[in-house]
Image (cartoon, rainbow, N blue to C red):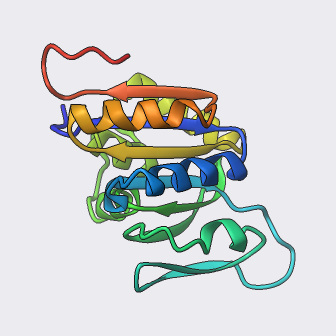
Amino acid sequence: MSEINSLVAVYDTHVGAEAAVRKLQQAGFDMTKLSIAGQEYRVEEGVVGCYAVAHGMKYWGKMEAFWGGRWGLTGTAFFLLLGIGPIVFAGPLAASIVGSLDRTAFGGGFNALGAGLASLGIPRNRIIWYESNLRADKVLLLAHGTSKELLSVRDHLRSTHPQELDLHFAEEGLAAA
């Protein structure tokens, strides 16, 4: 079991996820503890890609307005995941997925995305659910921190109306609310 506490919010649209990120930014949440994952729409022509720049990422593709935001998220990755499609990741989840690619076998029978989520404290049964949300073109927003920080994040995010808002605590005695 991971020692990391995580919150996962699922949004139906990139617009909803962007509003959530801005809300957390305004509340002073540490953006280095925030991750985002979502599909890039398939394009027939042109360049799709991203790379890290100071305090954000440079992004080309149809979702440039969303992914090109200067939110201060650390780390970026763009992968074509079989069964899901082209996915962009930003934040600690990107680093976790890249780290899982260096291992010859993913623990617990997970793919790279599942291994990355597991290393951030997400339970196995929820990993499958979050992957299915990505397949359905939903956007995942993950926050990592102390239980107190995540309870505050949850309170801020409720007003952004996520489809789902789950807490996953590593500390014993704390139940996900």
Image: 42 above or below 64: above
Front-most of residues 98 and 120: 120
Image: 138 above or below 127: below
Which residue lies at the image location 39% right of the left edge and 40% below the top edge? 110
Image: 154 above or below 72: above
Which residue lies at the image location 39% right of the left edge and 38% below the top edge? 153
Number of dots carrying numbers: 0
Front-most of residues 8 and 78: 8
Residue 78 lies, in percent from the top left, at 55, 69
Front-most of residues 49 and 58: 58
Q: Residue furthest right?
A: 44
Image quarter hosting the N terminus: top left
Res. 122 in view: no
Residue 82 lies, in percent from the top left, at 61, 53
Q: Which picture quadrant has residue 30?
A: bottom left
The answer to whether residue 89 is left or right of residue 59 is left
Res. 19 in view: yes
Front-most of residues 40 and 23: 23
The answer to whether residue 49 is left or right of residue 65 is left
Which residue lies at the image location 28% right of the left edge and 58% below the top edge? 104
Image quarter hosting the C terminus: top left
Image: 14 above or below 171: below
Residue 74 lies, in percent from the top left, at 37, 69
Which residue lies at the image location 54% right of the left edge and 56% below the top edge? 22
Residue 93 lies, in percent from the top left, at 38, 55
Q: Which picture quadrant has residue 66?
A: bottom right
